[in-house]
Amino acid sequence: MFGQTTTPAPTERGLEDLDAAALAYAARIEGLPPERRQEARDDLVRFAMPFAGRLARRYRGRGEPLEDLEQVARLGLVNAVDRYDPERGSFTAYAAITIVGEIKRHFRDRTWGVHVPRRLRDLILEVGQATAALTSELSRAPTVAELAERLETPEPEILAALESAAGYSPASLNAPVGGESSAEFGDLVGESDNALESVDDRVTVSGLLGRLPWRERRILAMRFYGNQTQAEIAARFGISQMHVSRLLSRALTWLRQSMLADAPAPWQTGTVDAAPPRMRLVVHRSGDRVMLEVGGDIDKEGADQLRQALTDAVSTGHPAEVVVDLAHVATVEPGAAAALVAGREAALRAGIPLRLARPGPAVRASLGAAGLAARVPG
């Protein structure tokens, strides 16, 4: 009607006629407004549909339903038609590249059994290609260092890619173990947690410990968490070993009774507990070395003082080393360890070594919980 060339009908030589059909489509829509191009576009898409199907069938048998692959291929075909420019060459070649790329992206993004970041998925493909190339060159499997050198990528990232590659198709927990046994793979994973039954007791004891006076709490922590002897505890508190034994016995008896009762029994003591010993802090400067000698218990108030002392030590005179001597520290409250963390960060920013020296077992455990164990010499 308008003197335009129509898209050829499908023939047995569909692959050979695809370029001609695309050229006819380009001539047909030339000069037409966008709203009138839809019919010609649909004709070309229908004509090229078998071509997209053939490309999709190349990837069947790889764990994805053929129907899904055909849908992905058709989406790639539509994109190829919409972006087709006859001046850039063969439509058949362009459509094949676009469709195959869409199918590969589908495998990359949608078929992983475990979520893996896209950056890591791309690196996994590069590692696979580099492994094949190096295996051919070296006649053996390449090492992580060789892969890192070939890809110019740090070794930790290569290791992460190798470990994450198993996430593409993880083993099913319902997979049979094999042999005559009817057991499944999931039966071999995990074991009974014998400590699970003690969770209630641990939670109850944790709450009851907070009701004890500070001295009894610290003696229990030093004895059962710090693994210190009664003689060592007695020396820290300046009391006799027999007195430590009596305090431990009374505290443990109260804990047992309170755990069995509906409500904790009131703590009975014949004397008023002494106030917790305040933290002692002395700063020694010797040449380009600064030592902070700390003693007593590091509580919240003492933590603020220690944090300020550490900040001043690393920011004044740029010393060669800052040492925190913890030999005379009895305990470090959980929140107070943040002062040492802040001091470590300040020292790192200033480029000054910070060393935590001579911590006792209880203090070492508190530092380990705060992530400072690596900074403490063994």
Image (tube, rainbow, N blue to C red):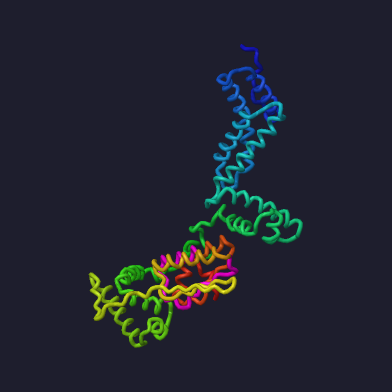
Indicate whether residue 36 is drawn in magenta.
Answer: no
Whole-percent x and y of residue 221? 39, 76
Between residue 192 and residue 302, name the one nearer to us.
302
Work out which quarter of the rendered image holds the C terminus and state it.
bottom right
The magenta segment: 318-342
Residue depicted at x 52% and y 65%? 344
Residue depicted at x 51% and y 70%? 373
Instruction: Write down the quadrant of residue 195 in the picture.
Output: bottom left
Q: As displayed, is residue 182 above or below residue 227?
A: above
Between residue 211 and residue 277, name the one nearer to us.
277
Q: As displayed, is residue 76 above or below residue 21?
A: below
Q: Is residue 196 left or right of residue 76?
A: left
Work out which quarter of the rendered image holds the N terminus and state it.
top right
Q: Is residue 200 left or right of residue 312?
A: left
Whole-percent x and y of residue 219? 37, 78
Between residue 145 and residue 273, name the one nearer to us.
273
